Image: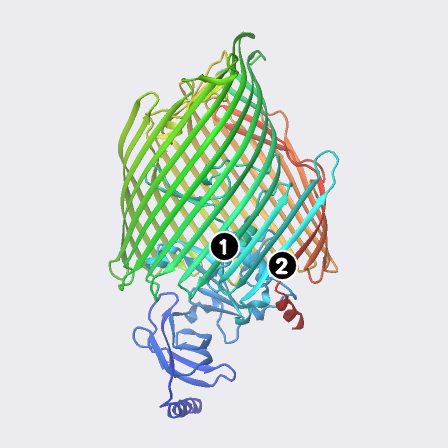
Amino acid sequence: MLTHIRFFYLILLFISGNLFSQSLSIKGVLKDSIDHKHLQHSVVAVLTTHDSVLVNFSRADKDGKFIIPQLKEGQYILMATHPLMGDYFDRLELSGSLDMGTIYMTPKSKLLAEVIIKSGSPIKIKGDTTIYTADSFKVSANANVEELLRKLPGIQVDKNGTIKAMGETVQKVLVDGEEFFGDDPGMAVKNLRADAVKEVQVFDKKSDAAEFTGIDDGQTQKTINLKLKEDKKKGYFGKVDVAGGLLKNIDDRFNNNLMYSTFKGKRKLSMFVLNGNTGQDGLNWQDSEKFGGNDDRNMEMSDDGGMMVWWGNGTVDEEPNVNTENGFITNVNVGLQYTNKWKDKVSMNFSPKFNSQIYDNAVRSNTQTQLGDSIITETARQQNHVNRNNFKNNLVYDFKLDSLGNNTLKVTTKANFYHTESREVRWGNTVGNTGTLKNTSSSSNDSKVDKQAYTTNILFKHKFKKARRTLSLSTNWSLLQSKIDGLLLSENQSYFNGLPSYLQAIDQQREGDKYNNQLLSQAVYTEPLGKKFALEMGYQFSITHSNNQQIVYAYQAATDKYDAFVDSLSNKFKQQVAVHRPSFKFNYSHKKVKYSFGSGFGITHFNLADVTLQKQYNRNFTNLFPTANLVYTYKGNHNIRINYSGYNTQPTINQLQPLRNNNNFFNEYIGNPALKPSFTNNINLSHNGYNFLKNRWMYQSVWANFTSNAITNSRTINLDSGKTITQPINTSGNLNLGFWSGFGFKLKKLNIDVDINPNLNYTRFIDIVNGVNTNNKNLSGGISFSVNKRKDKVYEVGISNRLNYNSNNSTAYNNRLTFITNIFSLGATVYVKKVWQLENSIEFFNRQKTPQFASNLSNQLWNATLKRTFKKDVYTAYIQVRDLLNQNTGIDRKFYGNTSAETINDRLRRYWMIGFAWNFKNKSSAKEGAAK
């Protein structure tokens, strides 16, 4: 009783002493974190930080709202209490009136299974966000944020830098709520100092669409936000890494990298220069986001009106993929990225890049095709040489057109230029069952391609005064044009009963022009239908014009020129596709349940003209794009998701009517103007859960795809000559079923992290050979596990194993083909006196033999590096050896329908290098950290 009297006495003294002073205020809304009920009559108090003296207090009304007036600038502790809830504490720095939005409080009945919130605790929960106070976790001097994350309960960082929080992979790491040189999670945590961080906040970030519209679509990304200390919001970081080694039988190896970034508030500037011949054709994922940004993202609308977004090598602007795991590559990569934001209203991102590659690879292949009782075997050798360069430019402007951000405008433009020179030399022969020769071929194909690609996207977004009522308008224009010059020399000999029957010699010059111009516009409007429901309506229109032309001239000895027009290989196509796509979607969101459903309607006008043959292919069709999803969060950090989508895939122009070519005389591809669009039903069921206190997580995912009118290749194979003619056709009955799961936990006494991942996949598809349907069924399943243990600056050990069973059953064969693959990996790092570091990674691969392949396929890859660090890991001298056992063989074996193939690529095998690396960060911060 005496305590209560003193409490109210303090309140009276406070009110009388501050009655006439000018004041600031704090307001917000209190809710139950489980049932989301308003917590009326809760007491909310403001205390001083240095001695916890009461400054002012208030009570929440029936809607959970509170306001605390008559406050001055300064630092405070906000405390909220309720008889049925655990106490809530938060530290605040008040420089103006503050609206805290919704504050969630945890019921006391749940506190035994949750983290208890205490004043001064290193961990606290604020609504759906878990907050770690960085200074409460001890790290070494000069440590980066990655080392800090390894100390935090509920967060794991593996040897590759992959971050998991509450059992889910972290997809974004923000710094003060914004991207830090791109959105790669590994970038900020590797290059920001741990002592610059005030708080680490972990939460599920809603999708960009949900954040804009206010309509929760159930799509989230596990996100970490690093809240920096005020005096640490500027600096620089980078690295210089120079390495080389002298070798006898192959070219000397070298790899030289220079990367530098600087930031001050919202302004960020990065540059990089890479030069090497060890297979590094560009920045790795982390460095790409950090020093160069990732502007290799592209968006396209397919013929049916569907949107497709992708990024990465080998897809953007129709550039061919070069797999640098195979062959030998020498590259130069230079880039610059500048981003800035002014007054939180205007932001800009500009990133020019230059890349040059010289690539060589020798490929050997052996392909067996079974036709009833007959087997045709093709053996080939191929030498590839590519010399190419590109210059890419990406510019993004983002405007807030008013102070509240209710009207925004974003403009993105790209201009990319490519030049590629390539040569492909190929030798091949085909034999029958008894070794009887059916054909031989040799060819040399040279080409030069010059290409330009331009894209501009304008996006306007508007929020109305009424919550969740929004409008977005976008226009996207793209232009892709290329010019191709080629030269083909080949000899193709056919045999009959082992004797030569027909010889074709080719000496031709090829000229090609390709042009694709697309304009796409879209409008999306959202309207709330009460507190729980909302409606989204959209309309999209696109029009695409394409030209594809090829002219071929044969060499004439009489004129010593390529001037004989070859009309059978010369043609020109024009295509125009117009698509109207209205759509609608209903959304529901309340407490633990969120769902949506709707559909789009693609009305397509398709026109393809063969100008050379004066043929016209016109089609009009309507497609449906149904979609539905459900998210049920049955308790904190545990949810179930169900997603369904249905979509059409239109045949490409190459499938409908490709340009004629004779690059491979014995393998010819022809089009099919009668192709229909395919339709796929896709459904996915997933579950994930995480127990914070026990540090256990799990996830399961089951999916199914059913495709009707699937576009499948039909092959006609001549048993006498071995020539194959391939044509796409429609088939039905394709099916794909799959299951993937994961379980993880920590053995606390041993400090060991354990992950177990079972999986299962079943595929059924139709293949057609010589007019006969071949039913193919593939089943694969397996289990993988990994065990990891580490002690800072003492050792790191990781052991993993992936076992898979594969079964292929085709009506082309009389029996089932089965084999097992297994990959065992061991990674270990040992530290001596904290400055010497020996790293080893060993991988044992084994693939079981089959009747088609008489021997097991196995190899052991062993890489080792010895490092010596100086000046608190700022400088590193090292020697590394790759593929110590010289077993890096590029052998790949595949089964498809009635075909089995083994391909052997050149590989960069054993080599060594000596190197020196300098990783630098803010000198001032380093001194401050050392002083502390």
Q: Residue at x 29, y 26 (%)?
A: 617
Q: Is residue 218 visible?
A: no
User: Is residue 873 among what the camera can see?
Assistant: yes
Residue type indicated by callout 2: Asn
Apparent side of residue 123 relative to residue 885 in the rendered image (left or right): left
Which of the two residues, 520 or 29, is positioned nearer the viewer here? 520
Q: Quarter of the image containing the C terminus?
A: bottom right
Q: Which amino acid type corresponds to the residue marked 1 in the rendered image?
A: Gly
Residue sitting nearer the eye, 158 or 576: 576
Q: Position of residue 185 (x, y in %)?
A: 52, 55
Q: Earlier in the sequence, mark 2 or mark 1?
A: 1
Q: Mark 2 = which residue? A: 751
The secondary element bearing badge 2 is classed as: loop
Count neighbours of disc 1 (C-alpha within 10 A) and say few if under 14, some if 14 to 19, many if 20 or more. Answer: many
| Residue 864 relative to residue 774: left or right | right
- Determine which quarter of the picture holds residue 517: top left
**Element type at marker 1?**
loop
Residue of label 1: 182
